[in-house]
Image (tube, rainbow, N blue to C red):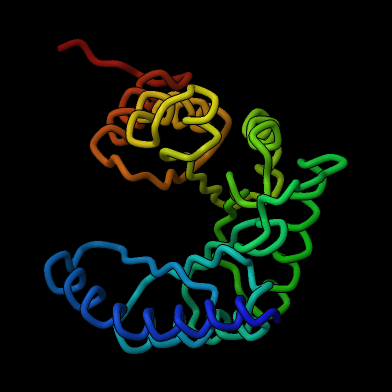
Amino acid sequence: MAPNQLKFSSVGLVLYQNLLPPLAEYFLKNYPEAIVSVDTYRSEIASIAVSDYGVSIINDISAGELDGKMFETIAALKVPYIMMHMKGQPGNMQQSPVYENIIEEVIGYFAKKTAQLKALGVIDIILDPGFGFGKSILHNYALLKQLNEFQIFERPILAGFSRKSMIYKVLDCKPGEALNGTTVLNAFALERGINILRVHDVPEAHQVVKLYDLCRPNMNLMND
């Protein structure tokens, strides 16, 4: 590990340890009905979050790549696990990523990872193709257009587009001005079979889901 990566990792761990307790306690106290997820690629933090604070889901952007103990930790914790595809590491993932066939590569990656998890007894797995993580703008849209291919896994698929560069760079606007583009991609992703949307703008995303549900085939509409 490079020195700057080691420093970043150490600082990140301390921040997690300091921030997790008050945040987890606040949400679990004030929103007891909420399903709380913690975003971490560290098995130590995952264990603390679930065992000490009752967190329901672990979301790992590295799919176990950055912590070799993560999969066995998830198996012991017995909680749903969101694993994301990321080519490279956070510090270098956007440095000219290359794919021969992005769909085949990401599907192959998830096939390998889900097999490893199943061997450990983990069955509650949610897949995140990782938009913006080790992918160019063109890679992101190639992935988006073929999201339905991930239904082969028969597992929930999660996607997050909110305010990402794949939107604001194409539209030549600021991230804060990318809500309309985000809404378009959220709707398209739902059409391609996505089950879970990760968003910043919750009311707007809820509207997308509500209208999409009414547009689905075989949806019976009642007169007012």
Q: Among all residues in the image, which is located at the extreme top?
A: 223
Q: Residue at x 35, y 32 (%)?
A: 209
Name the quarter where the C terminus is drawn.
Answer: top left
The residue lying toward the viewer, choosing from 11 and 221, is: 11
Query: Residue 40, position in %: x, y?
Result: 48, 72
User: Where is residue 216 shown, x and y percent of the image?
Assistant: 45, 22
Instruction: Identify the residue at image location x=64%, y=73%.
Output: 64
Q: Taking 113 as reference, is 99 above or below it?
A: above
Residue 180: quarter of image: top left
Residue drawn at (76%, 57%) of the image: 109
- Residue 16 image-quadrant placement: bottom left
Residue 217 placed where, x, y %?
Answer: 48, 19
Q: Quadrant of residue 222?
A: top left
Relative to 28, does residue 201 appear above or below in the rendering? above
Q: Is residue 113 left or right of residue 156?
A: right
Above or below, 210 relative to 70: above
Which quarter of the rendered picture does the N terminus lie within? bottom right
